[in-house]
């Protein structure tokens, strides 16, 4: 079984809704995992990739091999796809700086990094080395040597290259803004919320509030397959491309850059 770990960097704001009806101030909340971090469920990952591949001209036969046959009303047996798509899990979220040389920081946690390392081990990705030994889960760390305050929290300790190297592989510019915070702090900070409105003849008829994940936030997605050639064909089609995830595509949400970060898998395929 061969595998690839992809990084998804949001180029515009992202909203992947949880589909729940709730009676809070926020009408449409972002889907979150058990840890309370934003997530793109595997069905949404697969659907977004399928839509992109369909438009890319890869061919109907390869599309069916990758994703499986489409639903139909006839008696044909539906064939499953050969590629397995895992959920898009959060690796870092952009957050507003109250003090700092940049308007925002790229914020991760030890908990997020541990989950990333765990999935790389499951996918047998051995080339990626992310060393978090010696980092205290209860302390804050920063790459920048300047004073930084993220959403009212002072970032105190200097971060060496152990974690920074991973983020530089993804985006050198945003890696300069990297911050590590305790998971309790990041969960206590709400995601941004926008007011949405429906106008009829210039008159407001309905207003609602929607949560979103800010641009330049990072997710990671694992994809694997027993057919190495088919996986490589998929990789060639999506690597360094822009794919739309989630809802609100008509207002520019969900544009996401795909980056193939590392490959792994069993030696015998």
Image: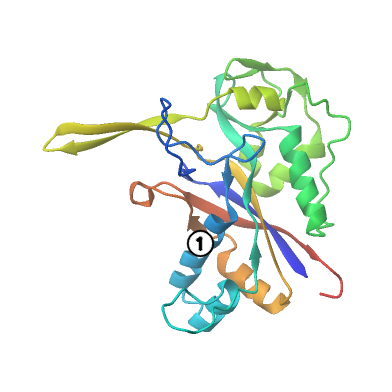
Query: Residue 182's spot in the image, x, y percent?
Result: 72, 25
Q: Does residue 64 lie above or below 43 as drawn?
A: below
Position of 203 with respect to 131 (left or right) is left
Toward which corner of the image does residue 66 lie, by quadrant?
A: bottom right
Task: Locate the C terminus by quadrant.
Answer: bottom right
Residue positioned 66% across, 22% down in the render: 185
In the image, is residue 65 above or below residue 157?
A: below
Density class for disc 1 (Cα within 10 Å; few <14, some 14-19, many ≥20) is some
Q: Residue at x 71, y 32 (%)?
A: 109
Determine whether the residue tagged by mark 1 lies in a helix, strand or loop.
helix
**Whether residue 102 is situated above or below residue 131 in the rendered picture:** above
- Residue annotated with mark 1: 47
Locate residue 47, reporting x and y percent.
50, 62
Q: Left or right: where does residue 137 sit relative to residue 58?
A: right
Residue 194: x percent and y percent? 38, 31
Picture mark count:
1
Q: Residue at x 53, y 26 (%)?
A: 190
Identify the colour scheme used. rainbow
Q: Nearer the viewer, residue 265 or 98?
A: 265
Quarter location, residue 264: bottom right
Quadrant for the N terminus, please. Answer: bottom right
- Residue 219 lies, in percent from the top left, at 62, 46
Q: Nearer the viewer, residue 139 or 75?
A: 75
- Residue occupying the far left of the picture: 201
Reply above or below: 161 against 1: above
Of 81 and 243, the residue lying toward us: 81
């Amino acid at each position: 079984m061969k595998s690839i770990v992809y990084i998804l960097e949001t180029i515009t704001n992202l909203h992947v809704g949880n589909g729940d009806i709730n009676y809070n101030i926020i009408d449409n909340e972002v889907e979150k995992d058990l840890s309370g971090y934003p997530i793109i469920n595997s069905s949404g990952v697969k659907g977004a990739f399928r839509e992109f591949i369909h438009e890319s001209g890869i061919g109907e036969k390869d599309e069916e091999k990758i994703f499986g046959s489409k639903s139909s009303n006839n008696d044909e047996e539906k064939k499953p796809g050969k590629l397995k798509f895992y959920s898009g899990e959060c690796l870092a979220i952009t957050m507003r700086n109250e003090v700092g040389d940049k308007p925002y920081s790229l914020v991760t946690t030890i908990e997020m990094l541990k989950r990333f390392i765990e999935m790389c081990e499951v996918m047998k990705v051995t080339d990626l080395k992310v060393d978090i030994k010696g980092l205290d889960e209860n302390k804050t760390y920063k790459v920048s040597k300047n004073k930084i305050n993220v959403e009212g929290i002072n970032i105190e300790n200097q971060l060496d290259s152990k974690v920074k190297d991973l983020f530089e592989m993804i985006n050198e510019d945003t890696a300069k803004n990297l911050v590590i915070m305790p998971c309790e702090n990041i969960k206590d900070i709400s995601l941004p919320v926008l007011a949405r409105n429906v106008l009829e003849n210039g008159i407001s008829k309905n207003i609602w509030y929607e949560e979103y994940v800010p641009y330049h936030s990072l997710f990671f997605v694992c994809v694997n397959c027993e057919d190495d050639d088919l996986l490589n064909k998929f990789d060639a089609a999506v690597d360094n491309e822009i794919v739309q995830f989630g809802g609100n595509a008509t207002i520019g949400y969900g544009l996401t850059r795909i980056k193939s970060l590392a490959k792994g898998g069993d030696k015998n395929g």
